[in-house]
Amino acid sequence: MDVRALETLRAVRTQGGVSAAATVLHLTPSAVSQQLAALTRDAGVPLTERIGRGLRLTPAGEALADAAVDVAVAVERARAACAVFLDRPEGTVRVSAFQSGARLLLPGLLTRVAALDGIDLECSDEDVAQDEFPALTDRVDVVVAHRPDGGAGWPGEGARLRVVPLLREPLDVAVPADHPLAGRGSVRPGDLVDEEWIAVRQGFPVARVLEAVAAAAGAPPRIAHRINDFSVVEALVAAGHGVSLVPRHTGGTHPGVRLVALAGVRAGRRVEALLRPDVAERLVVRRVLDELVAEAAEVSGPAPVR
């Protein structure tokens, strides 16, 4: 079986279809379909099936896609076995992070990697809904993602996705500097029942933390605005247009905003690095990942225990 065709099958599964897989593989949809057809002939059983206008893997296709992960890991381990004899590993590593995570970790990571000869780091900011982070690993080597405290693990974690804990970041309540709660050491969910909220879009981790806060308060939050950019959020809070949950390590930068700790509910998010198992075998990726873990520990303390 062709290794490239196996990679294509994996991408069709993680991306949810031929067109999306073609995009991350830098192929045409026709080329993806041709590779799937050739792989099906080699396998001798149907690997995909039509569902409406879409395509999904059959049970045989799912089993082969799982086996394709093992093949890809074996190939990368073979390459790494030779790479250890080089004076130093060289190559380009692509890293993405959600916006506030990028602000927290990428400057220091770039400084650290600049001291390593032979490694080029390409960074991007990608903030997507929580369930969409694993799919980014098809085109990004290291994906810095976040999920709420107590939330479910990542789809495919283990066999199909490597997860490396980086830090836990508390979420505080951002209020205007002249707000009656601004001088408090902490607030409880019940203290916030009458407040108007500036929330992130639904499906994003911080939105799920707000749902937990509302559940503890026994009343649904009164959401006035949905903004994902925390610098905009803080500007709105400072102007008196609501309160919000913001990350402690990067929040509170606006002079008109005060951060107040939230008591009575576990409000925080887990920041983790996501990688495909085969990519995690590359020596240059492992070196960058080591520096990322070290940077996270420096800005927040040791990585959280899972």
Image (cartoon, rainbow, N blue to C red):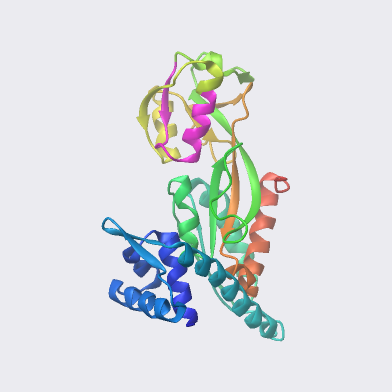
Pick the front one: 94 or 15: 15
Residue 272 horizontal/vertical position (percent): 60, 51
Q: Residue furthest front?
A: 45
Residue 278 horizontal/vertical position (percent): 59, 70
Residue 239 horizontal/vertical position (percent): 39, 25
Q: Residue at x 43, y 49 (%)?
A: 128
Q: Residue at x 36, y 77 (%)?
A: 37
Q: Residue furthest left?
A: 53
Eyeballing the image, is 176 above or below 16? above
**Which quadrant would residue 27 be assigned to in this image?**
bottom left
**Which residues, given as a range, are shown in magenta?**
195-213
Residue 268 seen in the figure: yes
Residue 181 seen in the figure: no
Determine if the magenta segment contains residue 98: no
Q: Is residue 226 left or right of residue 260?
A: left
**Which quadrant would residue 113 be assigned to in this image?**
bottom right
Residue 259 horizontal/vertical position (percent): 56, 28
Eyeballing the image, is 236 above or below 55? above
Q: Residue at x 34, y 66 (%)?
A: 18
Determine if the magenta segment contains residue 196: yes
Eyeballing the image, is 8 above or below 262? below
How many numbered marks appear? 0
**Which quadrant would residue 28 be assigned to in this image?**
bottom left
